[in-house]
Image (spheres, grey):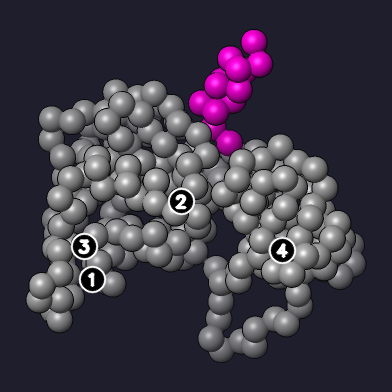
Amino acid sequence: MIRLLFSILLSLPIWAQIHTTITKIEGSGAKIEPVQAIKGMSGIVIHHFDADHSTIVARAIYQGSDTITFDVYDALAQESLPKPKILPQVGDEVILGYLYDRSLLIAPNLQSYQHYVAAHPDIQWLHPDLFAVELSKARHPIPQKEDFKNFCNKFATGTIHFALKDRVVEADCYTLAPLHHESFPVDQTKVKLPFYSRIKEIESSIFDFFGQKEIPDYFGYYSHLLEAK
């Protein structure tokens, strides 16, 4: 019964934010009040000055065993403004699953994209054209982990959904750690590389004479990307 319940939980979307508090600072991380979270979930650390004033001081990455590590929260970075020098401290609020209700779907074709999006109307979907444009600006025809992170920072997105051969995997935007999966019949008859979008081509850098111009296999590439540490 416990194993069955665990399997059901893994197949359900994780959209609810998890609120907790830092109890102890440990180097570049911290212990937090006990939570039920999945390793690799990201979030934010908020320092409250008083009842009406607060600020985000770091990104939090859940490592398991009620432990988080810190990373720079650069989603609101402004070159013209000074960087805040407040470090996370005991008592600061931690929100895991921040922006998990906003997502991007990477799918092999229009049919799979439309089918899955229509089945999940309560997610705020960002169109893959936006991601394709960002890749074109960076001249990265092969999306890397850093490309997803940059996109999520710019468009305030928390997760990426990847449509694979027989399932859709939801991953954290910043760690690409798989959070849950859902069985889904993905159309494999037509595949657009590197993913479905209405952008015809994502150009590579003019200086990249010998680099790879296109992912060789849609399903293999994204499966490997999710498995890479």
Quarter of the view holding residue 184: top left
Q: Position of residue 12 (x, y in %)?
A: 54, 27
Spatial distance from mark 4 to mark 3, Cα to Cα?
35 Å
Instruction: Check whether the beta carbons of the residues at disc 4 and disc 1 lie within 8 A of each other.
Output: no
Residue 149 falls left or right of residue 40? left
Mark 3 = which residue?
141
Is 129 above or below relative to 12?
A: below
Mark 2 or 4 closer to N-term? 4
Q: Specify the amino acid type for callout 1.
A: Arg
Mark 4 = which residue?
29
Quadrant occupied by the N terminus:
top right
Mark 3 or 2 closer to N-term? 3
Spatial distance from mark 4 to mark 1, Cα to Cα?
35 Å
**Residue 196 visible to the viewer:** no
Q: Specify the amino acid type for callout 3.
A: Pro
Instruction: Check whether the beta carbons of the residues at disc 1 and disc 3 lie within 8 A of each other.
Output: yes
Q: Position of residue 99 (x, y in %)?
A: 58, 50
Of badges 4 and 1, nearer the viewer stands 4
Q: Main secondary structure of the magenta part?
A: helix
> Badge 4: few (under 14), some or many (20 or more) residues near its Cα, within 10 Å?
some
Magenta region, residue range:
1-14
Q: Which one is nearer the viewer's eye here, 1 or 204? A: 1
- Say what secondary structure mark 3 lies in: loop
- Say what secondary structure mark 4 lies in: strand
Q: Position of residue 179 (x, y in %)?
A: 52, 39
Spatial distance from mark 1 to mark 2, Cα to Cα?
21 Å
Q: Specify the amino acid type for callout 4.
A: Gly
> Badge 2: few (under 14), some or many (20 or more) residues near its Cα, within 10 Å?
many
Q: Position of residue 188 (x, y in %)?
A: 18, 31
Quadrant occupied by the C terminus:
bottom left
Instruction: Check whether the beta carbons of the residues at disc 4 and disc 3 lie within 8 A of each other.
Output: no
